[in-house]
Amino acid sequence: MSLPRTAATFISPIVESRRWLEGVHFSAEQPLINVSQAAPIDPPPQGLRQAIAQAALNDDSAHLYGPVLGRLDLRTALASQISKHYAARLTSDQIAITSGCNQAFAAAIASLCGEGDEVIIPTPWYFNHKMWLDLAGVAACPLPVGAEMLPDVQHAEALITPRTRAIALVSPNNPCGTEYPAPLLRAFYELAKSRGLKLILDETYRDFDSRTGAPHDLMQSESWDHTLIHLYSFSKAYRLTGHRVGAIATSPARLSEMEKFLDTVTICPNQLGQIGALWGIENLSDWLAAERAEILDRRAAIHESFGILAERGWKLLGCGAYFAYVEHPFDAPSEQIARDLVTQSSVLMLPGSMFLPVDDPAGERQFRIAFANVDRPGITELFHRLAAVQR
């Protein structure tokens, strides 16, 4: 008897780590510092919530099925926003709206891969990407990162086989926080194009990139959409996590294939969430700039405060967007330390073993710190608690 698809992958690290909190009491003197998940915990701005509420009360169509690939007004607005940000020329027929960015990745894989095909992904990987590849019967080919937590193009090329269908990158990276340089992204794009592959580029955190202007020029290339599949999420930009609104930019022909998948899974994206995302594009550019400035300040706080950990043997491997990726100095494996941190230090963060293949020993020495919901004083307190750990 064959095993079900779900047996082919692991439990979500977010789900598993939340179980570590069960039955644990956190005192008022040492409350829990939760740096396990990269999702805003605050609600959207008042104006956006009002737009959703008004649509729920007054727009009957907001409660009906909509287009499988998303509302035309949102697709048109996003095409315009992307065009401006990347100095490119996109049209609405190159845009699809999905029920979150995870579904955007799933739709891309469904349109590209059959049973036993392969996708190259850098390690440490974004765990939901790996989970979906497992569930889809697609082999994830690990591409270990090198210096500055960046993947190597020549190494990636050596991994290509007749079953390879795509290379999947995340920039700014989850879990490492690393911002991939434009020349590196161009090199991966040219490699994919030359070998008839797709480059899936997840830019969920592009709104919190420390660089000004476009992070790359790939969409300025002729027929870019024949090679590039760009993924995006409104969850981080406008705090729409619970509404599940993501996006894809690629060729109309590729979107037509993805439409088959999307129609059988959700039929259409959340209508009210799409209305909120459109309102955000039209009204929240200044607000989002302030959110970006706050995240960049917290990133700066990580660098400024890390000395207290560096003195005790910790290493800062990567930092950017919502994440810092660190190496601890202890002999114990990271998962054991992570569990002990919950009860002994009131800290919840994810071990590197949750972002790497089980046979990669690097995971036992690493942690991801998701700092988007921790302010400067919270970051200082976190580092003092970690610095106090003795093993």
Image (cartoon, grey):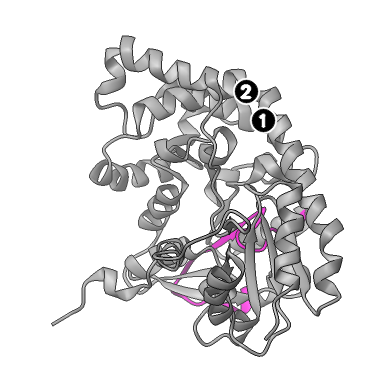
- Marker disc for residue 284: 2
Q: Position of residue 208 (x, y in %)?
A: 69, 43
Q: Residue at x 77, y 76 (%)?
A: 314
Residue 135 to residue 104: above or below: below
Amino acid carrying label 1: it is Leu
- Extreme residue in the top direction: 58
20 on left or right of 385: left
Q: Which residues are magenta?
A: 156-181
Q: Residue at x 59, y 74 (%)?
A: 352
Q: Quadrant of the C terminus?
A: bottom right
**Mark 1 sits on what residue?**
288
267 on left or right of 301: left
Q: Position of residue 202 (x, y in %)?
A: 56, 51
Q: For mark 1, does the 10 Å Cα neighbourhood hold few (<14), some (14 to 19), or many (20 or more) residues?
A: some
Is residue 91 found inside the magenta-colored segment of the image?
no
In this view of the protein, which residue sits in the foreground, 115 or 73? Answer: 73
Amino acid carrying label 2: it is Leu
- Residue 160 in view of the camera: no
Q: Residue at x 49, y 65 (%)?
A: 127
Q: Position of residue 149 (x, y in %)?
A: 72, 69
Is residue 175 found inside the magenta-colored segment of the image?
yes
